[in-house]
Image (spheres, rainbow, N blue to C red):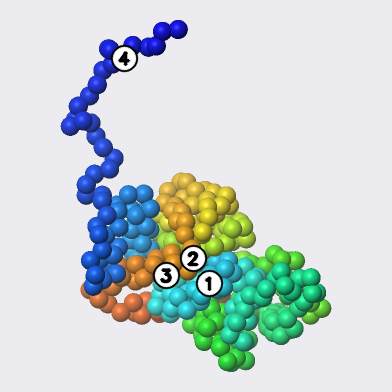
């Protein structure tokens, strides 16, 4: 077989051909002494560099416009030291609510009680001690029992208020306690059998399930206000992406407007459920989804700092704490109307 002749190939001029990458998209070398905004502006305007700016701008705009921004998280963000940033986000109005899995409650409570968490599973498992910390289980199960007796709180608020009442030595580092003090909702979504406290005799599956289901309904009420808002999934591979998708389904079924929704997934690897249940499916009919891959302890602080800088610039150096009352309003309404806030339009005031 003879090789194909290329003699009659039609070429085009490089000067006429469009290009997807231009000089103005290039990054800039860092100049010592610059600001954080200088750093952001120095990033290339390509791929994640451009998408990061877009996600930051959308989140800052949502906060400034009084829209809802929710943080869904696994337990790993607590283990890598992000609790102070999440608490700050609640206090300064970046987040109007937090959703976490059952393990998040455990690490949050242990940090508040003794200032440390995350045991060595490999070492403790074969010694028969893995998950056997007595105080962790007793504190959480007692808080759940008291919350169930009240009948008007979910699991997150029950544990948060128990921490405030107990005033443990390191309570200032608790997301649950901080949210309770601010009257902002933290919803807890438990999968029975996945957490160490489920092995203890003080575990009551009925009360845990009832309070976690109430939290799901509170979460649905929060999601119902995500029109032009933002949902962030931070390090939850399965539980929160599944819970979020079901909450979206509930809200659409009940007629709530979720148009203009921005979703953001942040994790150190790209996973199936966050990608389809957070980034793609909820925004398919209008909105924008982002996926950022990186270590939580680096990516999330940079994102929070960038959003705060955008708000600071956009409001003429206004104090972001001015949003606190708006955040509290979201918290009280969501706690008091767990069945989806039927009389609301779906978007924040």
For marks 3 and 1, the one nearer the N-term is 1
Q: Quadrant of residue 57?
A: bottom left
Q: Residue at x 67, y 75 (%)?
A: 119
Relative height, residue 157 to residue 73 (above, below): below
Mark 1 to mark 4: distance in Å? Answer: 58 Å
Q: Residue furthest front?
A: 2
Relative height, residue 245 to residue 32 (above, below): above
In this view of the protein, which residue sits in the foreground, 38 or 123?
123
Relative height, residue 116 to residue 35 (above, below): below
The residue labelled by disc 3 is: 301
Name the image quarter holding the C terminus: bottom left
Q: Residue at x 67, y 67 (%)?
A: 190
Name the image quarter holding the N terminus: top left
Q: Are marks 3 and 1 in contact (CB under 8 Å)?
A: no
Q: Are marks 1 and 2 in contact (CB under 8 Å)?
A: yes
For marks 2 and 3, the one nearer the N-term is 2
Question: Few, some or many C-alpha atoms within 10 Å of disc 2 (few <14, some 14-19, many ≥20)?
Answer: many
How many numbered marks have been drawn onto this rendered protein structure? Answer: 4
The residue labelled by disc 2 is: 296
Q: Residue 80: x and y, percent?
A: 53, 72
Kindly tell me whether residue 114 is visible in this rendering.
yes
In the rendered structure, find residue 80 and report the number of the disc placed on it.
1
The residue labelled by disc 4 is: 6
Mark 1 to mark 2: distance in Å? Answer: 7 Å
In this view of the protein, which residue sits in the foreground, 89 or 81?
81
Q: Residue at x 46, y 54 (%)?
A: 291
Comparing labels 4 and 2, the label whose residue is closer to the camera: 4
For marks 1 and 2, the one nearer the N-term is 1
């Amino acid at each position: 077989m003879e090789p194909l002749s290329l003699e009659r190939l039609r070429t085009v001029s490089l000067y006429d051909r469009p290009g997807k990458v231009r000089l103005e998209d290039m990054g800039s070398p860092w100049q010592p002494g610059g600001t954080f905004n200088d750093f952001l502006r120095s990033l290339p305007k390509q791929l994640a560099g451009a998408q990061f700016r877009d996600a930051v701008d959308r989140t800052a705009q949502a906060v400034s416009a009084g829209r809802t921004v929710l943080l869904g998280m696994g337990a790993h963000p607590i283990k890598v030291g992000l609790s102070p940033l999440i608490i700050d986000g609640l206090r300064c109005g970046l987040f109007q609510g937090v959703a976490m899995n059952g393990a998040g409650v455990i690490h949050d409570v242990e940090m508040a009680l003794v200032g440390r968490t995350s045991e060595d599973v490999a070492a403790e498992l074969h010694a028969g001690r893995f998950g056997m910390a007595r105080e962790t289980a007793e504190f959480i199960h007692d808080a759940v029992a008291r919350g169930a007796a009240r009948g008007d709180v979910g699991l997150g608020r029950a544990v948060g208020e128990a921490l405030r009442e107990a005033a443990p030595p390191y309570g200032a580092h608790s997301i649950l306690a901080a949210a309770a003090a601010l009257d902002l909702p933290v919803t807890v979504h438990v999968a029975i059998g996945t957490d160490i406290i489920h092995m203890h005799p003080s575990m009551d599956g009925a009360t845990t399930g009832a309070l976690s289901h109430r939290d799901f309904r509170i979460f649905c009420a929060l999601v119902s206000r995500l029109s032009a808002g933002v949902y962030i999934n931070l390090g939850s591979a399965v539980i929160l992406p599944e819970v979020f998708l079901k909450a979206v389904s509930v809200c659409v079924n009940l007629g709530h407007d979720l148009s203009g929704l921005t979703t953001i997934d942040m994790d150190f690897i790209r996973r199936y459920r966050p990608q389809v249940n957070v980034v793609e499916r909820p925004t398919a009919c209008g909105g924008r989804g982002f996926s950022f891959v990186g270590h939580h302890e680096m990516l999330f602080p940079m994102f929070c700092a960038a959003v705060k800088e955008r708000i600071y610039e956009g409001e003429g150096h206004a104090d972001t704490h001015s949003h606190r009352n708006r955040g509290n309003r979201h918290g009280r309404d969501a706690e008091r109307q767990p069945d989806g806030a039927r009389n609301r339009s779906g978007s924040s005031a």
